[in-house]
Amino acid sequence: MGTNQNTYIGPYITIDKLPTKSKNETLYTCSNTSCKIRGRKAIGKFCNDCGSENTNVTKTKEVNISPYELMNEFGNEDIMFNLEGEYLLPNSRNKYSIRYDDNDGFLKKDIMDKSLAINAFSTEHKDFIDFLISKDVQFTISFGVIAYYW
């Protein structure tokens, strides 16, 4: 298996906080609410600690909605590339950013003005950005260099 180092130069979205959703989780554990084993996975019909019957317990916990779930709900899960769960890079070639991987060899290209690049990015992805705002995603749009292995 090989990996390439990729470098992206341009505007991107940094996710500061994702919305949460409730998720039900079933756990086979001790039925005795005062048992110290309660809440941990049990094996067998009876609790090893207190002897109470083990049973399935459903608990609800809050989990972050993933960026790909948001993109899927938006109707285009390929609009952005999600890196490390924190960064969203445009998933298409455009005039305001540069992508480079180590197979490209040498790269020399002028970089457009940062504010022009951010404006072009924001205009091109306006519908998606508005969608993120409507879903209470806290994010910032930045311009910079992101290097990653893929």
Image (cartoon, helix red, strand yellow):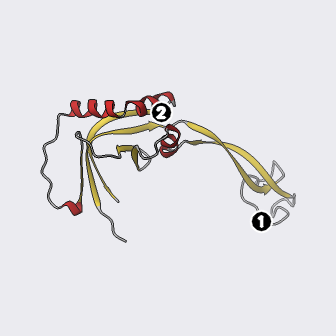
Residue 42: horizontal and vertical position, in percent? Answer: 76, 61
Q: Residue at x 51, y 31 (%)?
A: 135
Q: Residue at x 37, y 71 (%)?
A: 1
| Mark 2 residue element | loop
Q: Residue at x 33, y 65 (%)?
A: 3
Up-down relation of residue 108 to residue 127 (above or below): below
Q: Answer left or right for 149 relative to 96.
A: right
Q: Nearer the viewer, mark 1 or mark 2?
A: 2
Query: Depth check: 30 or 121 in front?
Result: 121
Give the quarter of the image for residue 125. Answer: top left
Which mark identifies residue 63? none
Residue 79: horizontal and vertical position, in percent? Answer: 40, 43
Q: Residue at x 50, y 28 (%)?
A: 134
The amino acid beneath tag 2 is Val
The amino acid beneath tag 1 is Ile
| Mark 1 residue element | loop
Q: Return the disc, 1 or 2, that comes first in the chain's sequence.
A: 1
Residue 37 visible here: no
Up-down relation of residue 9 to residue 139 (above or below): below
The 10 Å Cα crowd at callout 2, few under 14, some 14 to 19, many 20 or more, is some
Q: Residue furthest front?
A: 75
Residue behind mark 2:
137
Residue 43 visible here: yes
